[in-house]
Image (spheres, helix red, strand yellow):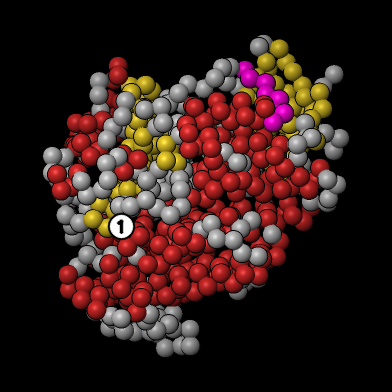
Amino acid sequence: MAQQYDVIIAGGGLAGLTLSVQVKKMNPKAKVLVIEMRENSAPVAAHKVGESTVELATHYFREVLGLKDYLEEFELPKHGLRFFFNNGHKEEISNRVELGPRLKLPAPSHQLDRGTFENFLANHTQELGTEIVFGARVKDINFSEDGHGVICNHGGEEKRFTGRWVVDATSRFSLIKRKLGFEKSAPHNVNAVWYRLKGVIDIDEWSDKMEWKTFLAPRLRYLSTVHFMDTGYWVWVIPLGSKNTSIGIVADDDIHPFNTVNTYEKAVEWMHKHEPLCASKICPPKEELMDFRVLKHFAHNSGRIYSSERWAVTGDAGAFLDPFYSPGSDFISLNNTWLSDLITRDLSGEDIKVRAEIYDRTHLAWFESWLPIYQDKYKLMGNTQIMVFKIFWDWAIYWSVPCLLFTNKGFTDLKVLKELFVSEKSLGKKFGLLNKRVQDLFLQWLPYENKIFSNRYIDPVDLDYLKAFQVGIEKQYNTNSLLAKVAENIGLLEHIAAELFRRISHEVKGTPLDIKVNPYTISLTEEVDTTSENALSRKPEIINDVAKMWFYESLVPEKEVS
Ligand SMILES: Cc1cc2nc3c(=O)[nH]c(=O)nc-3n(C[C@H](O)[C@H](O)[C@H](O)COP(=O)(O)OP(=O)(O)OC[C@H]3O[C@@H](n4cnc5c(N)ncnc54)[C@H](O)[C@@H]3O)c2cc1C
């Protein structure tokens, strides 16, 4: 006789386990079952990728799931994302342009050892009352009004469970997506290879130059997610709480084909060619590796995420875009938050039809509007000036809108979602359009911008608007004031977009720096609206902030503007 549960989660990885914690916290009496293929505890360090968290997911783990104490005691605090750009030869680190926070950032984040974290999550959710069956492989799901049947293979025996809800968290196994035929590809062809090394790698030790070594307080570079970048790729170095180190190469297939990195031997050869200093520091003999993994064309999309017929997908079983900026667990946080809201309402007898539809559309629209951040952008990675503009833009949009909405529970507030996404002139649509314009502008700029820079440090919190967005992430608003704040932030983003355009267009086309600009028309290839009532004038504080990220001497005197 099949056992009956309120929620069955297939797959007990990051998405499945965190969902079970969230559902149990919101519904202590709910019967929740997680079915996980892994037999035993996850290994420390050499388990999975998804080790670096950013602000949205950090809020989810710390505040929504209540894991702050665990994270502070057992995982590492993270010192932001850090980027080293191409300085021509890449044999000396100290003169590469470096972008990253120098002092502690206002909003926290963490570096996760995925093995340690998943083991903790599994114990924690069981303490909350979740049942877990380890060593069981889900084979099939029979969808039914009276409860979905979940069939799995457990130690050679077939077992059946019935759940009011069934959630697919099996990552790339994607059982529901395949069964119901809503697999969808994503137009972003990037591959990754990664491995874990025993021991700590502190990049402060990579140079003898004292001034560079001591520019940040000791261990702060070590605690960052470090990216070494050039055209078509980035290499990551991430410290783990288990005192090991995660290394990865992520590369656009058109520029660095998969077959140039897909074995450790080839990855080392590739590293010697493109990142010689990394080759000498983080490519030991193969026998010393803790693991080596590859993943071809990791981006994928989904035709559906939530159904009012009480099934859903979460984590990589749904959609995944790109690990640059470490957003994987952000998507899991959003996914699980929508899903646990639907489950909670359904268990309390509410009709969830409308909400399930709205959450589904919002989730998929969010994926589409985030795509231009990554699509075709690996070709920009060898260009320091463009990437500095781009990284600061990407952080600005991320901190000022999704992070703020998430910490204020805006994504489950129907009034907020309606204002943001429903009408053609909604704030969300404007936000997506503005971002697309700016991302296209970066691509249009590429043929004109090719200078190699060196010997600079650039800190995001030196820009007043970026610092204000970061500080503002955790600030609490009611529905109306949240909408007003999002509108205000988008207004500021419009001014930033217009000022970025003035700089770029002046450099490329010689247009005057003081033109009015409609930010929704910015382009180097089409006509730009500089005269209508939608064209914005300059703002002194934004001029100063943009001047700080402009590397060419000729325009630096703009600093005088007050
Ligand atoms: C190269 C790369 C780097 C990344 N870096 C980051 C980063 O720095 N930060 C970040 O936030 N995200 C990052 N991500 C994304 C992150 O790895 C994923 O978003 C996250 O691990 C997905 O979690 P999940 O629970 O969906 O999948 P998993 O954690 O893989 O869990 C799926 C679970 O399902 C189980 N399973 C599979 N099939 C079955 C079955 N049939 N029956 C039962 N169990 C099953 C598996 O054993 C597994 O435990 C990165 C992704 C890539 C590709």
The residue that appears at 32% across and 48% down in the rendered structure is 82
Q: Does the magenta stretch include residue 312?
A: no
Q: In which quarter of the image is the N terminus?
A: top right
14 left or right of 225 in image: right
Q: Judge by depth and name the residue closer to the eye, 175 or 243.
A: 243
Q: Residues within 10 Å of mark 1 (few under 14, many from 20)?
A: some
126 left or right of 554 in image: right
Q: Does the magenta stretch include residue 133?
A: yes
In percent of width and height, residue 483 lies at: 61, 69
The residue that appears at 61% across and 64% down in the rendered structure is 477
Is 38 located above or below residue 471 in the figure?
above
Q: Judge by depth and name the residue closer to the eye, 435 or 224.
A: 224
The residue that appears at 73% across and 23% down in the rendered structure is 151
Q: Does the residue labelled 1 lie within 8 Å of ligand 1?
A: no
Write down the residue under mark 1: 459
Q: Report which quarter residue 153 is drawn in.
A: top right
In percent of width and height, residue 522 lies at: 40, 74
How many numbered tags mark residues here? Answer: 1
Q: Report which quarter residue 512 is drawn in.
A: bottom left
Magenta stretch: give its range: 128-135
In percent of width and height, residue 142 lies at: 77, 31
The residue that appears at 77% across and 24% down in the rendered structure is 161
Q: Quadrant of the C terminus?
A: bottom left
554 left or right of 390 in image: left
545 left or right of 11 in image: left
Task: Mark yes or no: residue 478 visible.
Answer: yes
Task: Mark yes or no: residue 296 visible.
Answer: no
